[in-house]
Amino acid sequence: MAAYTVHEPPLKRYEAETDPERFVFVRDGFSFWAFLFGPLWMLRHRMWLVLLGYVAVVVAIELALHVLDVPAPVSVAVGLLLGLLIGVEAPTLRRFTLARRKWTNVGVIVGDDVESAERRFFDAWTRSEPTRSSPMVLAPRAAAASSDVVELFPEPGAGAQR
């Protein structure tokens, strides 16, 4: 099961309510595509400020490695580590960009994939509209208690016999 943060876009001038199709679900966890194609992934998600910071960091690292006359395998290792960092922090960078654009984090939802997470979120959303001050958090439903479960902890006073 994966956890997703749900982000609601700001209202447009002519809108009374936000169109549910514009909601964005950001999956928590490692992003393979951000690791493999960092700058292209940033462009695809229109993360201009993040891309600018990434380019500045890469240029600074490359200049430092060149000035220190570091061997090529070390430069490759540094590049892979930077890619790994981008892959790990990709959801945080995406949430940062959405927050900077005035999107509202309306909750956290858990699902097997993005479709099931969307379905669970919008089922709960239509039942009760959450307030802006308290985000909605939905977790998987717990299994019903079974009578076959052996109780491992004694009840208070159960050991005393008369």
Image (cartoon, rainbow, N blue to C red):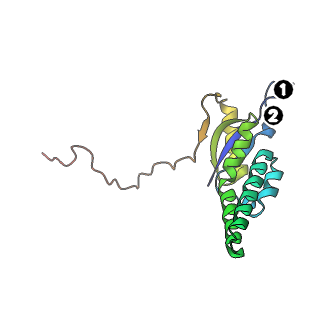
Camera-side residue of 42 and 70: 70
Which residue in the structure is indicated by mark 2?
19
Camera-side residue of 70 and 35: 70
Q: Residue farthest to the right? A: 14
Q: Residue farthest to the front? A: 67
- Circle number at residue 64: none
Within the image, what quadrant is residue 123 found in?
top right
Vertical side of 11 occupied by 33: above or below:
below
Q: Residue at x 87, y 24 (%)?
A: 14
Gap between marks 1 and 2, in whole Å?
8 Å
- What amino acid is labelled 2 in the image? Asp
Camera-side residue of 107 and 63: 63
The N terminus appears in which quarter of the rendering? bottom right
Q: Is residue 145 left or right of residue 131?
A: left
The C terminus appears in which quarter of the rendering? top left
Within the image, what quadrant is residue 32 found in?
bottom right
The percent coordinates of residue 99 (x first, y second) are 71, 38
Q: Residue at x 64, y 55 (%)?
A: 29
Which residue in the structure is indicated by mark 1?
15
The percent coordinates of residue 15 (x first, y second) are 84, 26
User: Could one spot residue 119 in this view of the protein?
Assistant: no
Q: Secondary structure at mark 2?
A: loop
Camera-side residue of 51 and 26: 51
CB within 8 Å, label 1 to label 2: yes
The percent coordinates of residue 4 (x first, y second) are 66, 47
Q: Residue at x 83, y 52 (%)?
A: 43
- What amino acid is labelled 1 in the image? Glu
Vertical side of 115 occupied by 84: above or below:
below
User: Could one spot residue 50 in this view of the protein?
Assistant: yes
Q: Residues within 10 Å of mark 1 (few under 14, many from 20)?
A: few
Q: Residue farthest to the left? A: 162
Within the image, what quadrant is residue 9 found in?
top right
